[in-house]
Amino acid sequence: MSENILDRLGHVLTELTNLLHNLVEALREEREAIIDFNLSQIQEIYKKKNDILNRIPVLERERTETTRTLAAELGFKTVPTLSVIFEKLTDRQKAEILSDKLSCLKSLAQAAQEFNDTQKQFVAHTLAHIQNSLKFIEAMQGRASFAGYNKTGNMTDTSLVMSTTSRTA
């Protein structure tokens, strides 16, 4: 088996790990930018996330090809998981290093997914609040006063007040 293929796989796993780390950081930055309502930063982070997400499939294809080649060199008829491949490696030190890289990659992928799910809920909640605020603003437009009172404090719309005579005791 060629050391080159193991080194290439290690390099791909490291690159994927770095990308996912950068994605998690971008998601953190995005949350702060949303909270601060910093539109220019949100746009900048969107571009950053897009760049990361465009690079991941390229590395995933390379990881898949490398895994397929390594599996064939180790005599597998089908392509097993990387964990199964690492168990069959005779160089235990290299197998442990690659296994650690894969474990780190899996942890970051899970963190990115959880962060993204939380971000989605946060944004959905924020949008619902904004939509309710817009409905309130639209309902108030065209009214000369707020809630039935004019600037001097006199009632202008008595339909907004429940009459004490209409209540039953």
Image (spheres, rainbow, N blue to C red):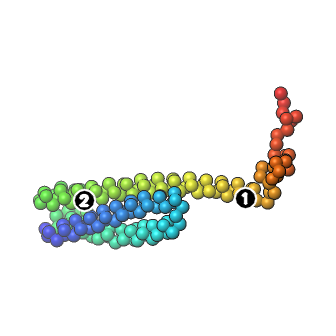
Which residue lies under the disc numbered 2?
101
Residue shown at the point (21%, 60%) measured from the top left: 98
Residue 138 is situated, as x and y percent measured from the top left of the image, at 73, 59
Residue shown at the point (85%, 48%) measured from the top left: 154
The residue positioned farthest toward the top in the image shown: 169
Q: Tell me the amino acid under the disc marked 1.
A: Glu
Residue 162 is situated, as x and y percent measured from the top left of the image, at 82, 40
Mark 1 neighbour density, 10 Å: few (under 14) some (14–19) many (20 or more):
few
Q: Is residue 71 visible?
A: yes
Q: Quadrant of residue 144?
A: bottom right
Residue 152 is situated, as x and y percent measured from the top left of the image, at 83, 51
- Residue at disc 2, secondary structure: helix
Residue shown at the point (42%, 58%) measured from the top left: 28
The residue positioned farthest toward the front in the image shown: 152
Which residue lies under the disc numbered 1?
138
Q: Residues under labels 1 and 2: Cα distance?
A: 54 Å
The residue positioned farthest toward the right in the image shown: 165
Q: Tell me the amino acid under the disc marked 2.
A: Lys
The answer to whether 41 appears left or right of 88 in the picture is right
The answer to whether 48 appears left or right of 65 in the picture is right
Residue 168 is situated, as x and y percent measured from the top left of the image, at 84, 30
The answer to whether 129 appears left or right of 121 in the picture is right
